Image: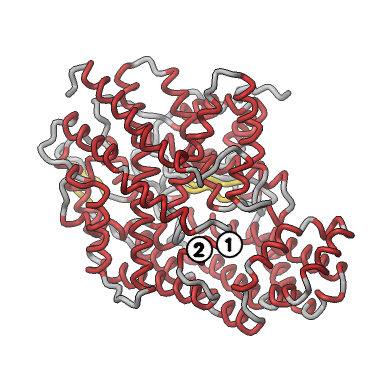
Amino acid sequence: MTVFVPDPTLDTTFASAPGGSRARAEVPEAERWNLADIFPSWEAWKAAFDDLEGRVRGYATRKGTLASGPGALLEALRESDTMGQLAYKVWYFASLAHDEDQRDNAVGARRQQVQLLFAQWRQATAWFNPELLAVPLDTLRAWMDADAGLAVYRFMIENLFRQQEHVLDERGEHLLSLAAQLTRVPDDAYEALSTADMRFPTIELSTGEQVQVTYPRYRALLATNRVQADRARAFEAHHGAFEASINTYAALYNGVLQRDWYQARARGYATTLEAALHGDNIPVAVVENLIASARANVGAFQRYEKLRRRALKLDTYHLYDGSIPLVDFREHYPYEQVVAWIVESVAPLGPTYQQRLADGFARRWVDIYENDGKRSGAYSAPVYGVHPYVLMNYNDTLDAAFTLAHEMGHSMHTVLSHERQPFVYSDYTIFVAEVPSTLSEALLLDYRLAHATDPLERIVLLQHAIDGITGTFFTQVMFADWELQAHRLVEAGEPVTADGLSALYDQTLRAYHGDAIDYDALSRVTWARIPHFFGSPYYVYQYATCYATSARLLVGLRDGDPAVREATIARYLELLAAGGSDYPMALLQQAGIDLAEPSTVGAVATLLDTLVDQLEEALGTRGLL
């Protein structure tokens, strides 16, 4: 068994995040991710790009060969895998470099080159699925039974036949492939408008400090500034920048909705939701029941917001009041200190897992702090054949600490999936993706609750546990609710306007928050700053289902019986290593999770009620209510 040994070179000075944004050239190498692990230079990238481009052009020569025998089919599948592995590196080298500073047009042009090549790739291979589907499935099964190499692709092939009714003929697939580059336009335009071209205003706080309300600074201000007027000013300035272009945002989102409806109809789906879920074999009822269950259980959510209003001694309570700690516990969480905590927190998953996570931090997987032009937010990029890369805009807040744990959970999922699965199954589905990220956050929370000595910090951590439920479950379901309603507008042939989208968002906000908050004029336009709506339609509901899954797994990890804990760990690591080798619902069932059981989702609301009781008692004991 591998024994975890902390890195002796780990910086224990726990330096704070930089005070302001910097030019990319000013960021020390140790604080940047190491893209040289993908390619040592742009020249090497160009050589790989040219190789991929040549393979894409050459793939068309395989057209008409698939029915000739198992050898020809296997060669075609393996060449497709080779192109896919190369594409990961070619795309992410350009894309990650672009996200370092999105104002760099030269890098942005290279990124667009890859997007154009991918569109050509889809066009060059549009014949593949219709031609494969023309071969009788019984014939293919006989070939797979006789050929171990071809048998690797069994799940992929049988899944394609399951979706056969939604695969078009060669001409239809070719026409859809020609539109592929267009489908990215609303998302790319949203990124440009909301990030590269966004000019967030600067506000003056009650202290006289001047602050530009960029994404990370806005989030940090809401999480740390205890003056409600300052939070209100930041909210108005930040969302006012979106309201100034609200008609443009609505036009872009209409483009997303129309694209999704076009693609759904082109493939013969009754709704956009059915089209989004069918690939992973997820019943539409999973989302519909999730929304219905959340709407039926908002009482605990609203009770928490009313408790916050009392604890914060506020006459009014707004969306911008939801992140501030309930107690005056001023603590910064320096990056290196949090790294050490995260590594220690995953000890329940075993020393091998723990060591590999530590290695990721040591080997510069993470781009740590904000710099001028850098993409906002955070993500984990699964670069096949190299290692994951994590983008952060770390700002020393508790929220940033848990975001780092979240993204490293994704990254470990990538590591285990890529090393255990053949390329064709290495990419896990979104439906499973948020399980390790939310579980990693829960483990960090457990670790801090066990080690925090300050009673006020314990209240902050208990609040964070509740915020994890309200933010990851109820808020994400609310987003999914609005998103589904918006898609149904286009399905019903209704107009999509800025006023209509904002009114729909206002109605949805009120359905979940009720009378627990006071509504501001700009609350109704906050949909415009949610990137998932534009870049990942029908994504956010999976945060909620994955939260329910990770909560159920935690029960096993916390069990007093060592045998139960070991069995839970084994099932969980197998889930991560399974990648996309089966349907996500089946993979979760193998891990002991059944989302068809109402108790799996309903238990979240019960847990929230219990935690709110505990927080109310803790605050009352200290005379803070």
Q: CA distance from mark 1 to mark 2?
A: 7 Å
Q: Is residue 109 left or right of residue 121?
A: left
* 291 lies above or below 609: below
Does the CB distance between marks 1 and 2 fall below 8 Å? Answer: yes
Q: Helix, strand, or loop for circle 1?
A: loop
Q: Is residue 222 left or right of residue 92?
A: left
Residue 150, can we see it? Answer: yes
Q: Helix, strand, or loop for circle 2?
A: helix
Around disc 2, counting alpha carbons within 10 Å, would you say few (fewer than 14), some (14 to 19), or many (20 or more)? some
| Residue at the (62%, 19%) spot, across then down | 562
Q: Residue 437 in the image: state x and y as whole percent.
A: 51, 40
| Residue at the (43%, 52%) spot, across then down | 541
Q: Is residue 494 left or right of residue 321?
A: right
- Residue 279 is labelled as 1
Q: Residue 424 in the image: state x and y as whole percent.
A: 71, 57
| Residue at the (12%, 41%) spot, across then down | 316
Give the camera-side residue of 537 and 95: 537
The number of callouts visible is 2
Q: Amino acid at mark 2?
A: Ala
Q: Residue 335 in the image: state x and y as whole percent.
A: 45, 32
The quarter of the displayed image where residue 307 is located = top left
Q: Amino acid at mark 1?
A: Gly
The quarter of the displayed image where residue 173 is located = bottom right
Q: Quadrant of the N terminus?
A: top right
Q: Residue 359 in the image: state x and y as whole percent.
A: 63, 33
List the residue tagged with mark 2.
276
| Residue at the (27%, 59%) spot, across then down | 505
The quarter of the displayed image where residue 71 is located = bottom right
- Residue 260 is labelled as none
